[in-house]
Amino acid sequence: MEIWDIYNNDRLQTGKTHVRGEKIADGDNILIVMVLIFDSKGRMLLQQRPSNMTWGPDKWTMTAGGAVKAGEASSQAASRELYEEMGIKIDFTGVRPNFSMTNAMAFIDYFVVRKDVDIATLVIPNEEVAAAKWVAKGEMLEMIERGECMPYRKAFVEYVFDVALNPMLDSTLSK
């Protein structure tokens, strides 16, 4: 059983928790992390969700991510999720997210990393990931159009690639 902290709209913990799989109450928020890995060629590492998943089966999505567990910091969750899903060890202790966004029920922290990863060394397939591949921005946008990828908005994908490929980006992204 996975337990998540509940946050109010000011991103303050309420003292309440949520059990994974149950409906999140109106006005409650959880914290989610996403780790986005880009290689030296400017491509993003994507993962394919297994066909048995209830949400987004067989769809390609960004490198790794998931909910932050109760009592866990966003940076700890980023390290844990990346390792659980892809078998990649990166310590994000003390690292701030590169950007954060919200949706109707969550705060989402994005950690962007520049790292060349050999797909053959990844610990996949596993329960959460069926496959992995590197894609350039144009290819990812085409995958979204064809329905192969999660339905990210074009402007969001362009923003993510712009953040990751900005030469002025903080050096903490070269893990």
Image (cartoon, grey):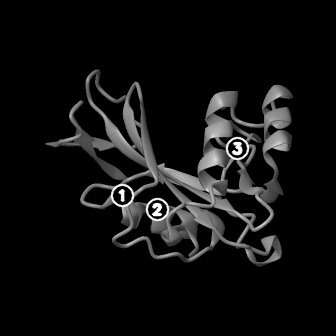
Q: Nearer the viewer, residue 25 or 114?
A: 114
Q: Name the front one of labels 1 and 3.
A: 1
Image-quadrant location for residue 29: top left
* Quadrant holding the C terminus: bottom right
Query: Real-space Cα distance between discs 1 and 2?
Result: 6 Å
Query: Real-space Cα distance between discs 1 and 3?
Result: 27 Å
Return the x and y of residue 79 as percentages of the image width and height: 47, 68
Q: Earlier in the sequence, mark 1 or mark 3?
A: 3
Q: Look at 46% across and 54% down and name the residue there.
A: 98
The amino acid on which the numbered mark 2 sits, given as a three-letter code, is: Ala
Position of residue 38 relative to residue 30, above or below, is below
- Which labelled disc corresponds to residue 52? 3
The amino acid on which the numbered mark 1 sits, given as a three-letter code, is: Ser
Judging by the rendered image, the residue that carries numbered circle 1 is 74
Position of residue 48 relative to residue 105, above or below, is below
Q: Look at 73% across and 73% down and name the residue there.
A: 116
Q: Earlier in the sequence, mark 3 or mark 2?
A: 3
- Which labelled disc corresponds to residue 78? 2
Residues at marks 1 and 2 touching, judged by CB atoms closer than 8 Å: yes
Position of residue 166 relative to residue 52, above or below, is below
The amino acid on which the numbered mark 3 sits, given as a three-letter code, is: Asn
Query: Real-space Cα distance between discs 3 and 2?
Result: 24 Å
Outermost residue, top side: 26
Return the x and y of residue 138 as percentages of the image width and height: 84, 40
Compared across the picture, whether 113 is left or right of 91 comes to right
Local secondary structure at mark 2 = helix
